Image (cartoon, grey):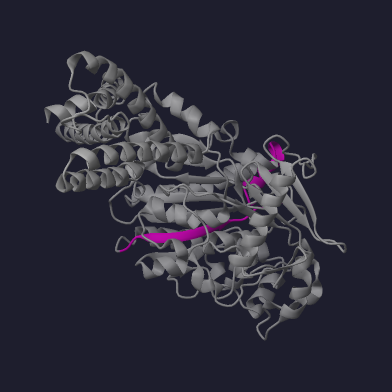
Amino acid sequence: MFRILKNTFPALFIVWSVFLTGTFLSDAPPEGFKAVHYLHQMKLFIFYTLFGLITGGLSAGILARKKKKYAYFFENEVKKYSIYFIKCFSISALIIFVLISRELINNPLLFRKTLLNHSFWFSGIFMFVSEKFSPMYFTAFFSIIIVMSIHNLSFNLSIYQGAKRIAGYSAAVIFSILLVFNYGYLNAGDKNEQRNIIFIAVEGLKNRYIRERNIRDKSALSEIKKSSYMFENFYTPAKDPKVSLMASLTSVHPDKGGYYGGYASYGIKDKTVLRFLSKKGYNTGIFTIPELAFRDFEKGHKYSVAFPEKGISTRSASLLDHLIAPVIFNNKVLINFFPEAKYLKEYRDTSYRTAAVNELIEDRTKPFFFIKVIPDYSGMMPFPYNRLAESKNETEAFLTYLNDEIEVILRSLKNSGRFDDTVICIYGLPERGSGLRAVDYKVPFILSRPSYGMERRVRNEYSLLDIIPTALDAAGVKYREDEFDGVSFLAPEFVRQNIFLTDITLLLAREDLYFYDRNGFPSKDLWVEREVYPLMPRSLIRGDYKLNITPSAQGPVYEIFDISKDPAETDDISGTHPITLRRMRTIFEETMNKDFNFRIVNGHVMR
């Protein structure tokens, strides 16, 4: 024990110093019973000690030298120990810095629960690192450190130690690697039961709407943001609200799922998060508007707003031509005689939806999941928000309306005592449009849970496909990675993320692409679709670079932009960066072929 402590003391000195300094200088008072608080601190201290022993062991392994007697005793002379201490201290500090930087970028939940207490000054260094660097750098560097340590230990032990000692050291090294590489996961992961999940999809929501100055007086939005992760580079795969909503509910890319054009392809409804969580024992519900509803999606869910058939839609539309329509819209009794009004976007009284949401939340027999779509009433805000729009501006009225809608949900969660056990995801649905500018495909995304305790911004690129695995991880729901196309923001592994965008306006503009079944629902003429698919422009975003692929009669035209330096995409660098162009083209074509099952013919994407 003395030899182990002596050789790992430099690393133990670092972790003990940081832990004790962060504990005593923290301005956060103990929560709950003091005995429980100090027991938790003791557990953390023990874990930090184990972390220091492992880190010190790696450092000692790098400094291992051949001795005539005891190879496992690296420094046995007192006069040399000071030199050894400095060397081991430096290597240990580097290992800890690299490891925590990597884990912080991969899993920001680590920020709250380990060395990086947000009240401690040391956290500022890692905040800077997390914003400026990729975890790939730290992963590679940390792997080199482990390889060096294992090599030195194995080489010396194979010469001077017996087989049992070699086996023991090898097992220790293997367990050390497993523990160290899952350091952030072990600290950030919650072992509690499954939590509730709420998706709030807001039509027309933009990043600039939810800046601090705009929501300062919006209590619900401010409360959610103060304990959340705000994603700055979050993309929708297509500029269409219905397609975007489907992407967030299935985690299947539209090119792969085939649900472009506002129709649901065969079998796609079985891939929704509602169906997945229903099998996990969740109560599920979907509360949307007819314009963004999909046929059969609501069936099988106890709490839902049914998709209207053609006859109901016709009767609903006819209500707008009658003088009594405003009375029906705003009367809870008459709505029972005219249920068709519920399926109109212009219908203002959403008490029936609010009642269903409250019933879903208050049913404590199971965890729940529901999605609520908040429409963009641009130019026609409901009463009394229309007056606010006239006196101030449309954005202020919309944010007030959004805040009130969220406030109803938060109030129900708090009244039922389920607020602390609920994950809330708020994201935007884009307006329909054309073009491939990255800035036009950005939508806001907020992942919130009361236990996060602070607001933090995420600059890595993610898309609507990643909402489901991220929410499931935050809620503690187990799933297989192959069940979804997206990746979790909270996954402890480093994932190189590609973002694919598709301009679908050409597909939506073709009236002859649609035929209608006997209930009046649109489907797609697949033969015509095959003619259109090769002509749709697409983009690939990886890191700072964006590749545009625009079909033409002469073949696809390729452009590359550095969107970090050129967000307006005015400077095509494909001519000056041929290697980058070739690499991006290879990534795009291989992904379309292997993952999306498309054929690439002369650069064109073919079904």
Left or right: residue 59 versus residue 329 is left
**How many numbered markers are drawn?**
0
**x and y, in percent, of residue 547 in the image:** 71, 50
Decide if residue 217 is on the left or right side of residue 523.
left
Residue 421 position in % (x across, y down): 34, 50
User: Which quadrant, please, contains the N terminus?
Assistant: top left
Residue 209, quarter of the rendered image: top right
Q: Reply yes or no: does residue 427 show up in magenta.
A: no
Is residue 378 visible in the rendered structure shown here? no
> Is 325 on the left or on the right of 353, as rendered?
right
Q: Residue at x 38, y 60 (%)?
A: 368
- Vertical order, 458 against 269 (above or below): above
Q: Nearer the viewer, residue 46 or 64?
A: 64
Residue 362 against residue 391 in the figure, above or below: below
Q: Is residue 607 above or below residue 247?
A: below
Q: For residue 2, what is the image quadrant?
A: top left
Q: Is residue 371 magenta?
A: yes
**Residue at the image position 67 percent from the left and 44 percent from the top:** 545
Q: Is residue 336 visible?
A: yes
Quadrant housing the C terminus = bottom right
* Part of the protein shown in magenta: 366-393
